[in-house]
Image: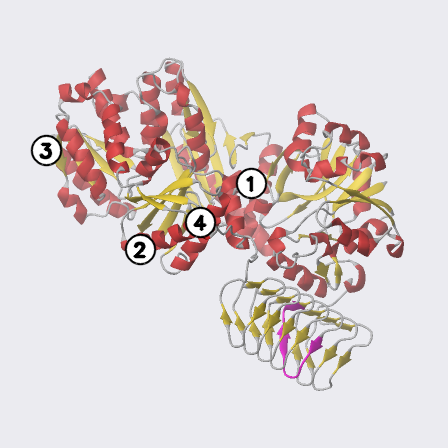
Amino acid sequence: MKGVIMAGGAGSRLRPLTCGRPKPMTSIMNKPVMEYAIELLARHGIKDICVTLQYLPQEIIRYFGDGSDFGVRLSYFVEKTPLGTAGSVKNAEKFLDEPFVVVSGDALTDFDLSKAVKFHFDNRAAATIVLTTVENPLEFGVVITDEEGRIVKFLEKPGWGEVFSDRVNTGIYVLEPEILKLIPPNTMFDFSKNLFPKILELGKPLYGCVLEGYWCDIGNIQQYRQAHFDMLEGKVKHGLWEGANGKDLRKGKGTEIDPSAEINGPVLLGDNCWIGPGVRLGPYAVVGDNVIIEKGASVKKTVIWENTYIGKGAALRGAVVCKGARINDGVSIYEGAVVGDWSKVEEYVTIKPDVKIWPDKVVERGAVVCSSLVWGSKGISSLFGRMGIPGIVNLDITPEFAARLGCAYGSFLNKGDRIIVSSDGKLATDMVKSAFISGLLSTGINVYDGGVLTAPINSYGVRVMNLKGGVHLKEEDQKINFRFLDERGVNIKRDAERKIENNFFLEDFRRAKDSGIGRIINAFHVVNLYVDSLSERINPGFIMKRGPKIILYTENSLIRENLSSLLEKWNCNVVYAEDLKDFVFAGKPTEQEKFFHRLSEIISAERADFGAVISGDGERLILMDNHGRVIADDLYTVLICLMVLKTNERGRVVIPVTAPAVIETIAEKYNGEVVRTKTLPSAIMSRMLENHGFSSEEGYDQFFLQYDPAYALIKLLEFMGKYSLTLRDLLNEIPDYYMDFKSTYCPWEAKGRVMRKLVDVERKRKSNIELLDGIKIYTEDGWSLILPDTEKPSYNVYSEAFSQETAESLTDFYLDKIGEIVREEKSKN
């Protein structure tokens, strides 16, 4: 059995720790993290090891040499260009003439590799992935196995809706050498994205071995610090700190501690350190070799690298101080902050939380540093929710935040790209929009200022002006939301969101030269273009012939003015329901009930054909027929699917997994087809646009019916006029269906375990399940979908059945199941 250590990582999310060194050379407890990987392989008898290198390879070769100092034999294989995880191992193919274990050179673990090797041989696997359980699986590859451990499904870096287990790929593999034949030479090729799907497709035995023990993929500063604390507590059964009790003081040769210093373990001190009088050190302090800590300094939950100086009275709380840095008297450094190699922080400086000082910088005396110099790194988290980036005005979403976000988004785009930015015209969004645009301009992006628009009009502007994307800001209940659109005018995909998030947290922004700064172009005319397009996409004769009377209500003045004038031009009798402003449209259920009751009264009093409500943000259309039935949410989706299928023989509609099964019934009636997709708006929108060629030949395009309320309303009026139908007639074509939806609390850290246990239980029951998005369970009575909420610590349960009572019963059954698992996990902890 041979070993492979993948050590090509640059560690961009760990900057400035990794400025000037590859990630595997990052110090953990005063030695490179890759050294722990070598020790682990050697402990399990694997001493013939190759190391794959790409970023700063000489740093690793210089330190480890031929491996003899570490009791192993090391061979090195350097990639000339990045080849991906599997491609880098393929590059070492001539060395790998027998089964081999692949480990990461920048992760910390104490797994029993011998157990994984035995599992691999016992199952005669072609490839075995070592799995472990984690609380938050979003940054890893999630894996599901059958009862024998054979892998049946996996997904790389899922969203919460895609999480079907808390078991993740650790990046440790046991592989047979013939697997290398599946990897093309000199080509970017990843294990998770390319090789493992190929193995599954070919039907080769791919297994997952779940190991207990410690594993930390050191991906950000927070995880880096936590790895130290875990070792200090003895959680890692590895080397020097195996068996530590969490209170130890361990010091190296030649280290001196003044008798008046106060040491609170656990603390690690390297060789030849000097700890001065009155110093308070610990708990949770790691100090490298040749470090001086002067009189009265206080160091807690901090990692200090070698050859560093800490001045008198300095206070370090949860910081990382890199090699050779000088921290002078009276300096205060707070949690999450990092000072890079050889930087100098002058007297009485305050470095705020999460600020990063890059190598070789000087911070002047008395400065208060609130942002990183010159770039930064922050533990990755998620900015994006379901429909963009939400946050509270001047708390989460400040002008500073917006400018930084503009830089992040601009750096994601190419220099010189053109995008449109708009808002709902409120004071808060206009303030934030200005700052956001400034950030974009600084990265060389040309901004078309759309002024006051709605998201559908912004989307139209992207397409009609052939732009690279669009951003729309809206505010509701003191919360601002940034919505990002791609060049098609639909929500950007998750991989784009991740890249923007990485840019934001790393602060690794492109800066344009003076001549390359972006320009602002006035695009207020896009509203007129949009209104003209509504006229072009309709046959007004069908509306004029019927002369319908409708009740219209919207708080959006842009929509109200333009839509009313269009409809009146087409012989519509539009009654604006002014007195509905005294009722709450988007409030609690009781308030909504009052709103719709009043709308029903107005429709009856005016003898109108129907009522139409467009939400204040201009993104949602709700209808009410002349019998008081509300058409919203799932029923609205059914209605527009009916319109598309009815007007297009063998048409195709795209719906999320949460949509009612009655749509399949309607599709069957009209020889149509239904494509189900994930619930994430970007997924639905993308599939609908891909489906554009299958939309109605008569112009009833599902994408616009679903996401453009003004277009949807006029197309509905055209449809009713053309086919001499009322809204009531259309609703009568829809078979009865019964749905229920409820939500239940589930801690973030338990979400993955809940999903895995639900999948395990349903598989044992031989249930008919689907894992497209969450877990969908089909029964004789109907179906239930259990879906983790992307923005809240909760699970959402959707059910459909042959009666309302049965649908509610199905929902309650799975709510109880989730509650049981959560309580079980809580009692264990």
- Residue 493 location (% of width, % of height): 48, 38
Q: Which residue is mark 4?
A: 515
Mark 4 / mark 2, whichever is N-terminal:
2
Q: Residues within 10 Å of mark 3 (few under 14, many from 20)?
A: some
Image marks 3 and 4: residues in contact by CB distance under 8 Å: no
- 656 over 79 or under it: above or below: above
Mark 2 / mark 3, whichever is N-terminal:
2
- Residue 39 location (% of width, % of height): 82, 54
Image marks 4 and 2: residues in contact by CB distance under 8 Å: no
Side of 538 where 781 appears, left or right: right
Q: Which residue is mark 2?
A: 428
Foreground mark, 2 or 1?
2
| Residue closer to the observer: 620 or 817 | 620
Image marks 3 and 1: residues in contact by CB distance under 8 Å: no
Q: Amino acid at mark 3?
A: Glu
User: Which circle marks residue 606 in the picture?
Assistant: 3
Task: Locate residue 218: give its quadrant.
Answer: bottom right
| Residue closer to the observer: 678 or 269 | 269
Foreground mark, 3 or 1?
1
Q: Secondary structure at mark 4?
A: helix
* Real-space Cα separation, disc 3 to disc 1, in angstroms: 51 Å
Q: Secondary structure at mark 1?
A: loop
Q: Quadrant of the C terminus?
A: bottom right
Mark 4 / mark 1, whichever is N-terminal:
1
| Residue closer to the observer: 484 or 703 | 484
